[in-house]
Image: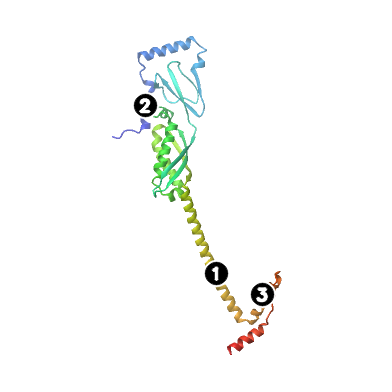
Amino acid sequence: MNAPPITTRIRRFSNSHEDYNLGLCGYILLMLSYALICLTFPFSLTVCLKVVQEYERAVMFRLGRILGGAKGPGLFIIVPCVDAYTKVDLRTVTFDVPPQEILTKDSVTVAVDAVVYFRVFDPVISITNVEDAPKSTQLLAATSLRNVLGTKSLQEILSDRESIAQTMQAALDEGTEGWGVRVERVEVKDVRLPVQLQRAMAAEAEAAREARAKVIAAEGEQKASRALKDAADVIMQSPTALQLRYLQTLTTIASEKNSTIVFPIPIELMQAAITTYHS
C-alpha cells in the first residue's frame, strides 16, 4: 500500500497537535504561566496579545511542539514562558537567480539568469520541513536552471524561452511542494554569449544578408532586362515611337546643368545609312 503524500501527513499531524500530552513538567509550567498572567493582569495583556496582518500567518509552538494550525489574520493569545510563535509571509516573493555559467547541449558556454516568483501556501510545513524556505527555493532554482538548460542547444535557448520557463516551473514545483512553497512563475531574463561567439554570429548574419542582397539584385536585373526587351520589341514595331524616345532623351539631357554639347542627328539619316548597309 502506497504511503500518503508528505503534505497529507503533515496536515494530519498539524490537526492533532492539540491532543498531545505535555507531561507533568509541561502542565506545571503551564499552570505557573497562567498564574503569572492572572497576577499581573491587565499588564500581562501587552505580552499575551499578538496581531498578525492579513497577508501573514503565525505558527505557534508550545514547549517546542506545534500548537494547532496557523493563526491569523487578526488577534491571538500566547502564554508567556511557554508559547513561542513565528510569522510567515504569504505574499508572492520575487528573487533573481544569479547568472549561471552553463554548457549547452552543443558545447557552447553561455551565462543565463532568470527571475522566479513564489509564495508560501502552507505556513506550518514551511516552518517544520525546511530551515529557510526562501533561501532553499533560491538555491534549488539555480540548480534547476543549470540542469534544464544543460539539455538544450543554443538555438533552443535563444528561441524557445517559454518552454524552458515552463519546464523549470514544473521542476521547482515538484521540489518545493514538501516545503509548503508554490512556484507561480519563472522567466529567463538574459542569455549572454561569449564575445568571440557574438562576433562569429554577427559575421554569419552579415554574410547571409549580403547573399540575399545579391540574389535580390540579380532578380531585379533579370526583370529589368526582360522589360527592356519588351520595350525594344514595341519600338521596333513603330518608327514613330523611336522618334519620340529620341526626342525625350534630348529633353532630359538639355534639362541638366552640364557642359555637354549634343549634336542631334536626324533619325532619317540613320535609317538611310542602315538601309544602305543592309543593301
Location of the C terminus by quadrant is bottom right
Of the image marks 3 and 1, the number of the one nearer the N terminus: 1
Q: Which mark is residue 260?
A: none
Residue 245 image position (x, y, % from top left): 65, 76
Residue 213 image position (x, y, % from top left): 53, 62
Residue 121 visible in the snapshot: no
Between the residue at mark 3 and the residue at mark 1, the CA separation in whole angstroms equals 22 Å
Residue 236 image position (x, y, % from top left): 60, 81
Give the SS element for disc 1: helix
Please tell me which residue is depicted at 40% across the width and 43% down the height of the picture.
148
> What residue does disc 1 label?
221
Sort mark 3 into few (<14), some (14-19) or many (20+) by Cα contacts within 10 Å.
few
Location of the N terminus by quadrant is top left
Sort mark 2 into few (<14), some (14-19) or many (20+) by Cα contacts within 10 Å.
some
> What residue does disc 3 label?
249
Please tell me which residue is depicted at 49% across the width and 53% down the height of the picture.
202
**Residue with the most extreme top position:** 39
Residue 178 falls in which quadrant of the image?
A: top left
From the viewer's perspective, is residue 169 above or below residue 59?
below
**Which label sits in the foreground, 2 or 1?**
1
Q: Amino acid at mark 3?
A: Thr
Give the SS element for disc 2: helix
Give the SS element for disc 3: helix
Q: What count of labels does the image hold?
A: 3
> What residue does disc 2 label?
13
Between the residue at mark 3 and the residue at mark 2, the CA separation in whole angstroms equals 99 Å
